[in-house]
């Protein structure tokens, strides 16, 4: 009986850790729209909060948007990371993209459900304490985007 009570007590100690774990965190409480050939930045169209990374070395980012039409243009997503608890920020660049954006997603990328584009990337964030979404650039000159958001997963 003592052994059983000890196991139950240990499990109860770790229950709050499991309950506080949020594996999918959207950067925006409400998705935004982006006009054709326009940019939205942090504080000017994007109200992204900074997401603490804890001890994560790798995270997943799912960029989501619904294009009004399809073309061969891209939607570029930019992020920043902090290494000091959110006091200062540095660009999280991808040298493989022409713009330096972390993700350049074609507006004609195959949609999974209806016309919603969902594009997943995994990135290393070793040593970073926080991440935030700071810019989206719709390079499509004729089609707007709706339901634009990014979800971070551990």
Image (cartoon, rainbow, N blue to C red):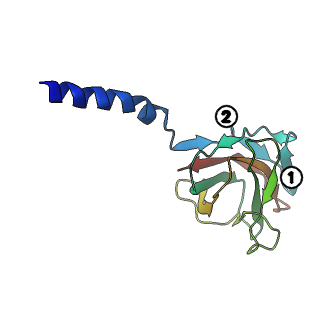
- Compared across the picture, whether 154 is left or right of 38 comes to left
Q: CA distance from mark 1 to mark 2?
A: 19 Å
Measuring 51% from the left and 39% from the top, which residue is drawn there?
22
**SS of the residue at dot 1?**
strand
Measuring 17% from the left and 28% from the top, which residue is drawn there?
4
- Compared across the picture, whether 98 is left or right of 52 comes to right
**SS of the residue at dot 2?**
loop
Residue 16 against residue 120 in the figure, above or below: above
**Residue 53 screen position, x and y as percent:** 62, 46
How many neighbours does mark 2 have within 10 angstroms: few (below 14), some (14-19), or many (20 or more)? few
**Residue 79 screen position, x and y as percent:** 75, 54
Residue 42, quarter of picture: top right
Residue 39's label in the rendered image is: 1
Q: Where is mark 2, residue-wise?
A: 29
Q: What is the count of numbered marks?
A: 2
Closest to the observer, 31 or 112: 31
Answer yes or no: is residue 27 visible: no
Residue 147, quarter of picture: top right
Measuring 72% from the left and 41% from the top, which residue is drawn there?
50
């Amino acid at each position: 009986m003592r052994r059983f009570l000890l196991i139950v007590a240990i499990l109860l100690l770790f229950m709050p850790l499991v309950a506080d774990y949020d594996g999918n965190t959207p950067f925006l409480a409400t998705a935004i729209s982006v006009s054709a050939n326009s940019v939205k930045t942090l504080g000017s169209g994007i109200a992204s909060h900074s997401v603490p990374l804890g001890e994560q070395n790798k995270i997943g980012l799912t960029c989501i948007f619904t294009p009004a039409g399809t073309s061969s243009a891209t939607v570029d997503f930019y992020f920043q990371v902090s290494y000091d608890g959110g006091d200062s920020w540095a660009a999280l660049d991808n040298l493989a993209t022409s713009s330096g954006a972390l993700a350049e997603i074609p507006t004609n990328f195959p949609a999974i459900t209806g016309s919603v584009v969902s594009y997943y990337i995994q990135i290393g964030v070793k040593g970073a304490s926080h991440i935030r979404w700071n810019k989206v650039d719709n390079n499509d000159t004729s089609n707007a985007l709706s339901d634009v958001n990014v979800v971070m997963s551990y």
